[in-house]
């Protein structure tokens, strides 16, 4: 059992490592997995590098089976995931399949071919967030909300034949119908019940990880989905944002990260940000 105000970082593949988490002990899971075929996280077992998007959806279903096992019966899963386009050949300079950051390596690995599934054609938006949501629903999760994250400062795109993308999906799933949700924890400025669109600015956390989500996104999920002292889980922890915010909110956290370099960076980030008891 974790002592209060601790962050535990487990290094490895979530599909295996989540077996180390005591069943029924986690109150909420807040996470963002790698998006399919976008960034290369430099590990043979990374999720997101599957040869087909169907394989990617299956990988995520397997991870979230481990998450469901770890959750309390009244626990919730908050899942942020982005979409992508089916493309033949070049990827362009911008957009979800753009040659930015370390994207190129992964795009080349899958040879820029339109995946042979779901009737996809060149330039089709794949609808991955909803395909994942439906697969999780079919696997037993209760899908309770779709929140649209509206980005105040989205990645610029030079497209001329469609609007630029400036939103991402965040899904709220529950293990059971009687789940814990504190509607008083985060309200609209007017005092009204929180709406399902969140307008969030960029986060100047300054960490070297390529895909950090805003602390405010994690904060809202953690406050709505748990109480002080509860355990919050992130099976794709990256730079450790969920752990940082959980500890700042007096929650305990269990983080899982495949790449040991990112795990080490999150240890330093958490140690710098907070005076915490860390289990290394
Ligand atoms: C989108 S990033 C998460 C970023 C995080 N939300 C943050 O704010 O820093 C996804 C992370 O999942 C990790 N990852 C990929 N495959 C994994 C797996 N099988 N098990 C655990 N982590 C994995 C990647 O190394 C990457 O750091």
Image (cartoon, rainbow, N blue to C red):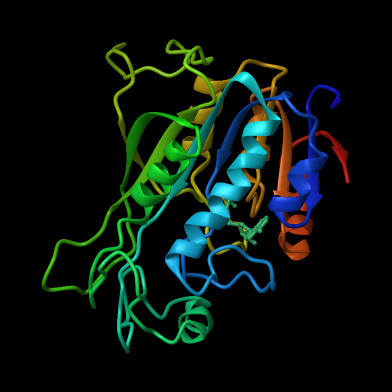
Q: In the shown orientation, is residue 16 left or right of residue 178?
A: right
Tell me, yes or no, if residue 33 can be seen here. no
Residue at point 53% right, 33% down? 77
In percent of width and height, residue 63 lies at 62, 48
Give the tally of numbered discs.
0
Q: In the shown orientation, is residue 12 left or right of residue 45?
A: right
| Residue 228, above or below 126 | above
In percent of width and height, residue 46 lies at 64, 66
Residue at point 52% right, 48% down? 32
Residue at point 29% right, 66% down? 156
| Residue 269, above or below 3 | below
In percent of width and height, residue 187 lies at 37, 17
Which of the two residues, 257 or 54, is positioned nearer the viewer here? Answer: 54
Q: In the shown orientation, is residue 232 left or right of residue 144?
A: right
Ligand 1 image-quadrant field: bottom right
Which of the 4 quarters of the picture holds residue 31?
top right
Q: In the shown orientation, is residue 152 left or right of residue 65?
A: left
In percent of width and height, residue 95 lies at 31, 70
Which of the 4 quarters of the picture holds residue 278?
top right
Tell me, yes or no, if residue 251 can be seen here. yes
| Residue 89, above or below 238 | below
Which of the two residues, 220 or 118, is positioned nearer the viewer here? Answer: 118
Considering the image in quadrants, where does the N terminus appear? Answer: top right
| Residue 17, above or below 118 | above
């Amino acid at each position: 059992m974790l002592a209060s105000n601790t962050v535990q970082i487990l290094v490895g593949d979530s599909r295996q490592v989540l077996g180390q988490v005591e069943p029924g002990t986690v109150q909420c899971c807040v996470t963002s997995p790698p998006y399919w075929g976008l960034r290369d996280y430099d590990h043979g077992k990374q999720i997101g590098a599957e040869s087909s998007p169907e394989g990617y959806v299956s990988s995520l279903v397997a991870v979230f089976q481990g998450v469901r096992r770890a959750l309390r019966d009244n626990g919730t899963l908050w899942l942020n995931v982005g979409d992508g386009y089916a493309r033949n050949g070049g990827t362009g300079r911008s957009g979800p399949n753009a040659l930015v950051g370390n994207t190129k390596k992964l795009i080349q690995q899958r040879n820029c071919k339109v995946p042979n599934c779901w009737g996809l054609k060149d330039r089709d938006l794949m609808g991955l967030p909803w395909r994942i949501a439906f697969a999780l629903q079919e696997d037993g999760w209760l899908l309770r909300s779709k929140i649209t994250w509206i980005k105040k400062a989205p990645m610029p795109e030079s497209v001329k034949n469609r609007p630029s993308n400036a939103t991402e999906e965040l899904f709220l799933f529950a293990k059971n119908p009687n789940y814990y949700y504190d509607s008083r924890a985060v309200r609209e400025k007017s005092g009204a019940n929180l709406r399902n669109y969140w307008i969030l600015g960029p986060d100047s956390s300054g960490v070297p990880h390529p895909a950090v989500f805003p602390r405010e996104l994690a904060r809202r999920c953690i406050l709505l989905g748990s109480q002080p002292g509860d355990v919050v889980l992130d099976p794709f922890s990256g730079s450790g944002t969920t752990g940082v915010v959980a500890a700042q909110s007096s929650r305990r956290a269990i983080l899982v990260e495949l790449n040991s370099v990112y795990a080490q960076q999150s240890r330093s980030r958490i140690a710098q940000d907070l005076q915490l008891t860390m289990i290394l």
